[in-house]
């Protein structure tokens, strides 16, 4: 008996032992599912709730092996649900498994509302972005036009100031000439008057 047990032990090679060891199944966090499925966090929970209720005859640990973690099977079902939509997905699961599936109107409605809300929100965001871009371009054009107008006004003002300054200088020069002429004429008159008086005095003598 002991020999048989030893033989059995010897027959169990390391390769045979390794074949019986299975790699642990990969599971995912909510954040990983959000990135893989390209959905919002709330959508992941809605998907999970609908899948667990649809597969009501399966233990929940198949889909959620631990708190906050989701199995490879859950990821696959979520991808199918996202592709098919809630109604078609539930009908397909019931038909393939020959089991009646109760349609969860609340879940279906929640999924639809979330999807529609996301689409509407994305559309509103896109419109706001386009409006912001258009308004910014409009404001930039108005700003550039105002700057050009200010530059033009400054140029015109500088030109007018230059003309005025030149006119003032010319007027000052003219005034200087007039004063010089008046002084010269006064000197001539004074000289002529003095000469006339001297002649008169000579005649009297």
Image (cartoon, rainbow, N blue to C red):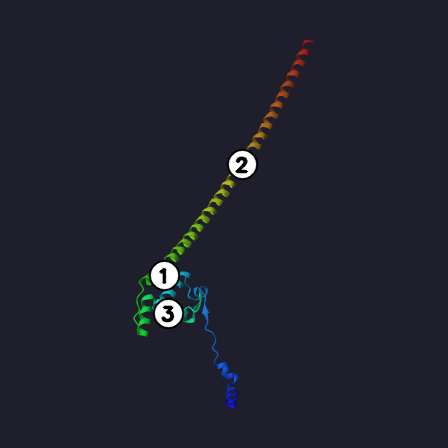
Would residue 113 be found to the left or right of residue 72 on screen?
Answer: left
**Where, by quadrant of the figure, is residue 191 drawn?**
top right
Query: Does the residue at mark 3 contact the one at mark 2 (Cβ under 8 Å)?
Result: no
Residue 127 in percent (x, y) is at 39, 54
**Could you tell which of marks 3 and 2 lies nearer the N-terminus?**
3
Work out which residue is located at the far front of the displayed protein and give it. Answer: 1
Work out which residue is located at the far top of the displayed protein and give it. Answer: 205
Residue 134 in percent (x, y) is at 42, 52
Closer to the camera, 8 or 86? 8
Q: Which residue is mark 1?
A: 115
Residue 12 in percent (x, y) is at 51, 85
What residue do we see at 62% from left, 20% from top? 186
In the picture, the disc for residue 185 is: none
Describe the element under mark 1 as helix, strand or loop.
helix
**Could you tell which of marks 2 and 1 lies nearer the N-terminus?**
1
In the picture, the disc for residue 161 is: 2
Closer to the camera, 54 or 8? 8
Closer to the camera, 71 or 135? 71
CA distance separating discs 3 and 2: 80 Å
Relative vertical location of residue 168 with respect to residue 44 in this rendering, above or below: above
**Could you tell which of marks 1 and 3 lies nearer the N-terminus?**
3
**Where, by quadrant of the figure, is residue 178 drawn?**
top right
In the picture, the disc for residue 80 is: 3
Query: Does the residue at mark 2 contact the one at mark 1 (Cβ under 8 Å)?
Result: no
Locate the C terminus and report the quarter of the image it occupies: top right
Label 2 crowding class (10 Å Cα cut-off): few <14, some 14-19, many 20+? Answer: few
Label 3 crowding class (10 Å Cα cut-off): few <14, some 14-19, many 20+? Answer: some
Would residue 20 be found to the left or right of residue 184 on screen?
Answer: left
Label 1 crowding class (10 Å Cα cut-off): few <14, some 14-19, many 20+? Answer: some
Q: Nearer the observer, disc 2 or disc 1?
A: 1
What residue do we see at 52% from left, 83% from top? 14
């Amino acid at each position: 008996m002991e020999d048989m047990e030893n033989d059995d032990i010897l027959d169990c090679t390391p390769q045979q032992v390794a074949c019986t060891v299975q790699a642990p199944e990969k599971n995912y966090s909510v954040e990983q599912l959000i990135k893989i499925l390209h959905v919002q966090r709330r959508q992941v929970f809605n998907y999970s709730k609908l899948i667990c209720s649809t597969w009501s005859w399966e233990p929940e640990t198949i889909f959620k092996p631990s708190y906050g973690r989701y199995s490879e099977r859950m990821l696959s079902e979520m991808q199918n649900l996202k592709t098919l939509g809630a109604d078609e997905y539930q009908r397909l699961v019931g038909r393939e498994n020959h089991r009646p599936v109760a349609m969860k109107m609340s879940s279906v409605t929640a999924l639809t509302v979330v999807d529609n809300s996301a689409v509407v929100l994305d559309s509103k965001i896109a419109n706001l972005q386009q409006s912001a871009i258009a308004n910014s371009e409009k404001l930039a054009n108005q700003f550039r036009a105002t700057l050009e107008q200010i530059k033009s006004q400054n140029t015109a003002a500088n030109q007018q100031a230059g003309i005025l300054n030149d006119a003032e200088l010319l007027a000052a020069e003219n005034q200087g000439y007039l004063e010089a002429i008046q002084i010269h004429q006064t000197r001539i008159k004074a000289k002529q008057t003095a000469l006339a008086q001297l002649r008169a005095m000579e005649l009297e003598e």
